[in-house]
Image: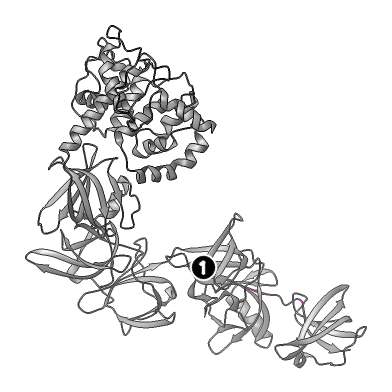
Amino acid sequence: MLKNKKILVLLLCLVMLAQASGVMAVSFTDLSKTENTAWANDYILDLANKGIINGYPDGTYRPNGNVTTLETISLLHGIMAPDPSDVNAALAKHKAYINTTLPDISWGEERVAYALERGVVTKTDLEKAHKNGMLKDGTKVYASRITVSMMMARALGLKEKTIYTLTYKDYKAIPENFRPLIAALIDTGVLHKDGVDGYFLPEQNVTRAQIAKMVKVSYDWKAKNDLMEERKTESGQVFEVLTINKATKLVYSTKNSTTNTSVEVDKNTKITDKNGKAVAIKDLEKFKGADLTVVYTGKLPDKLAKEIKFTSDGSFVDGIFTFVSFRKANNKNYLTIKDSKGREMEVQSVYDYAKEGNNERNFAFMSRGTELEIKFTLNLVKEATIAKEKSGEYTFKYVDNRKEIITLAKTNKYGRIEEEDFSYDPLRVIVEDQNGNRLNLTNSLINYSVDVRLDGFFNRVEKIVFYLNKDAQYTVDRFSATDLIVKDSYDKIHQFKTASRFNFNGREYISLNDVNLRYNDKVDLRFDRYDRIVEIFTADYIDRNREIVTITSHTFDNSLSINKSSYGSFVLEKNDSVDYYINGRKADFNDAFTTISRNNYAINGEVSFVYGKVKSIYIDTNDYNVTKLGEILAIAKGYYSNDYTSTLLIKVNGENKAFEMSNYEVEYNNLKEGKTVRVELDYRGNITKIYKY
């Protein structure tokens, strides 16, 4: 109730809009024909009889009193005369801000919200007024002439004048960015070009007499212009958005017309998309090519948009499109392209080629599916550039230089890998990485992602681009079927998704749950252009995760083979880039081959890998096949994959060692705790076999 009483008092004081409720003429006891405010009497009485302003309960108007900021906003609300639905929408949008940031406002929230929405005031204006105590009930801090003038110009929707002359003696005291609107207010008659004795006095308070004249003239000017403002409606399609002398122009073609027209769009233009959602002027570029309906006033070149409704999405927004086909007709170039949503459309192009670096590629020789980066002007393709890293999702599998065939793989819509052969001319094909560096087309590039370009006549590969530089080294933290979470060298966490099919140590998988990954494993990752993992190699950057393998020498071809590796089998020859170490010393291929051949052509050793390839081989013959005595401390038996297993804890040389074996490895089946056994150790001291003692 208290709040309602405050509102009632303020209504009586001055500024609330109201309907005229009586037929008797309004009069005020303090309006004299001889006072210094007599010039304002007619304005005051006219507004009072229309119910726009009121006096005080004692029958006075107090023309020399000052006007507050909230009172000014309320008066301007009447001038704008908004639809109630627009007011409610503005209040819903700004209510939380007003209640939180402007706690002084106890009445007129909806007027403040609408003024904020229309740009009559800004949040900066309101927050500054709040800080200065101008929004409190009963405030003695009043609105200045410059503040009231600017709010009134915005409420009337005035445009800044580009050519004007201000004759105020203190015009330099008016902020420069405000002067064009002050000049516009003078043209309406709201302000006088001579001001007060030749001065504008921007920081002086506005009196109740002065505001009466300003409001009366504003109402009259708006009524006159509303009558002159015949609204028309047009429908068409957006061609372009231009900025001319700081003004935004929307260029569009009208239905059943071969010519274009344009309207100016300003802050008072109501703009909505096909779903009725508000659109900002800065976002109009997104609607090039969209269908629209425009409500406007005036004639070219001064058409002003009052309302714009887009009835479709934009089609000619600069971006990536897929090439479909090309044709020429009547000396004009026509492209058929698809946008990101799969919508196909034909557009006219200024040129018959697309840029490719410093070269040009004619559309007539372009392969269907090539992705183009297109820039539009007036719905014409002004510029098209072949988009790198965007076309195709192939993986390089094999090249047969003798038959001049390249085998590429691609995932089909069912998630299956399909391989396809392409012919190529080795003398003409361009092979390079994504940075433009030339490459040799060899099978060492297997499993890398590639883009290919086919010629338009023979369907042969004329260019192939390899994506080589997206490798990284990480430490495994955890993983799920499709997500791998790793740490980089700075212990920063990264989460990557796998491709639908990926390689792990040279073999293909569809789930990380099917691979042998462990916490803290060191891994090399290779990504496709969408940052999905396509290859994983468990690697040891500090030689910590070596794998025990059997290394065999072959005298018939002077090679070494590595078996029983999770990476698969490898054949090594003398010229392969591998580091060899024998009993801790650096060695070479010949040393390793001789050492292994002396040990019945096979020996256990350790191997470390990088990118799935053998990096180093370690052979230690000092403790090879050494046997020791040990005492069985404990035996655990169970079943694993339907094989009977035994896990034994044995004390050897003062150390407790665990040994797990399947039943076919156990040569002495009657093992018991406390028994002494003879065990065979490898060169790392691990138990490899147990014998009866």
Mark 1 is surrounded, within 10 Å at the Cα level, by few (under 14), some (14 to 19) or many (20 or more) other residues, namely some
Spot the residue most to the right: 674
- Quadrant in the picture for residue 422: bottom left
Residue at x-position 68% and y-position 81%: 604
Residue 47 versus residue 677 in the image, above or below: above
Residue 673 versus residue 163 in the image, above or below: below
Is residue 72 something that shows in the picture? Answer: yes
Image x and y of residue 6, in percent: 49, 28
Image x and y of residue 609, in percent: 58, 72
Is residue 401 something that shows in the picture? Answer: no
SS under mark 1: strand
Q: Quadrant of the C terminus?
A: bottom right
Residue 258 versus residue 281 in the image, above or below: below
Magenta stretch in the rendered image: 612-623
Residue at x-position 84% and y-position 92%: 668
Q: Quadrant of the N terminus?
A: top right
494 sits left or right of 242 in the view? right
Tell me, yes or no, whether the highlighted magenta stretch contains residue 614.
Answer: yes
Residue 496 versus residue 253 in the image, above or below: below
What residue would you read off at disc 1?
497
- Please state which amino acid type lies under the numbered disc 1: Lys
- Quadrant in the picture for residue 416: bottom left
